[in-house]
Image: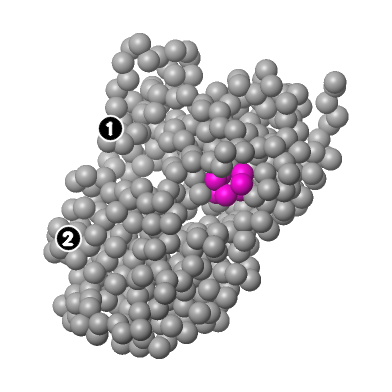
Amino acid sequence: MRIALLSYRSKPHCGGQGVYVRHLSRGLTRLGHHVEVFSGPPYPELDPEVRLTRVPSLDLYREPDPFRTPRPSEIRDWIDVAEVATMWTAGFPEPLTFSLRAARLLADRADEFDVVHDNQCLGYGLLRIQRSGLPVVATVHHPITEDRRIDLARARGRRRLTVRRWYAFLRMQKRVARRLPALLTVSEAAEQDVAEAFDVPAGRLHTVPLGVDTDVFTPSAADPDPDPAAPLRLVCVASADMPLKGVPVLLEALAKLRTERDVRLTLVSRLAPGGDTARLMEQLSVTDVVDVVSGLSDTALARTLATADIACVPSLYEGFCLPAVEAMACGTALVASAAGAIPEVVGTDSAAAVLVAAGDAEELVAALTALADDPRRRRRMGAAGRARALDRYSWESVAAHTVTRYQAAIDAAPTREA
């Protein structure tokens, strides 16, 4: 099967979309399929067998210069004009402009592919691709309506107008989602939320959970003689510095926890300099016990998770929650919010994780304190989490189930003329 896999941005490390594209493309090629990834910047890191087509953009949100003003010489066509104009008016243009560029690239190459798989873009360009006769499948990890709901709840005054404008692309995503014959999502909870938020007709949504590389994400060798005076080591992986990830709640809990014991937090995230999270760390006086790291390779991330005493997932919503699965695969005890798909992912029997109310810093403190004082329980939870990851989450299974949905889309599509 010849597959065009589209991803409007694919952060190489510690970013859900980049992880999904890298591992899904690897799993598909190992099954014998040909995969070509079309991605906007930042570009993914892929296996040598996977071809990468870099879809150019103005890259207006790149680090360390987000919301930059491009030089006039960078403007090449009307799509570039639309991209910069949308940014200047406080909107987010990438889903639309990437999809239009991808449609333009595929217009001349339609006979080279059997199916097109979009990753979370849901731009109008997908409808152009579909009209060309190519079957289109799209993955929706979670409805961005949840991000908007949480951001609006935190916004005040004129800021609410800016938030509404930023999420204006949701109208497009809803229209496109209703017109695509096959949508994939990553959990039963996300399937219900996507169906409700986007008003997707029954029968068009299919759940294919994500996976984890259990050969990389694996427990570290146990320290036979741990230092009882060593600080409690916490880790939190938050791919985006945004309210949805619940990092402020964890920082509030950390501020309380450090008054009672020696503790350090490794926060795997790319924080905006001088942004809300950085300012909150200073306000709570926890900067000295938080190590912020980003851009970790899979091996380095696995080591960070495996050597922590407790992994924390304080998200206010998750459509799946790959960091929770990665922590379980590393055999690390987990404290997570009972939000979105997290209970479904970690298991509701609490053998692998302690679930707390989303946004409740006091309950998070209590859970962390109880685990800090019970190393035997942490070891039992770690073993249960590892067993669950091995049993339920593998990229080979993800790829195989995805191919089944590709074939169904191909079978249902009108026959293309030779």
Label 2 to label 1: alpha-carbon separation:
24 Å
Q: Is residue 194 left or right of residue 324?
A: right
Q: Mark 2 near mark 1, Cβ–Cβ under 8 Å?
A: no
The amino acid sitting under disc 1 is Asp
The span shown in magenta is: 20-26
User: Which quadrant holds the N terminus?
Assistant: top right
In the rendered image of this protein, does residue 307 appear above or below residue 131?
below
Q: Is residue 141 left or right of residue 372?
A: right
Q: Which mark is residue 18?
A: none
Identified at 40% across, 14% down, the residue is 75
Identified at 58% across, 73% down, the residue is 388
User: Which quadrant holds the C terminus?
Assistant: top right
Q: Which residue is mark 1?
A: 65
Which secondary structure lies at badge 2?
helix
**Magenta-colored segment: predominant secondary structure:** helix
x then y, percent, for residue 122? 58, 37
Q: Which mark is residue 287?
A: 2
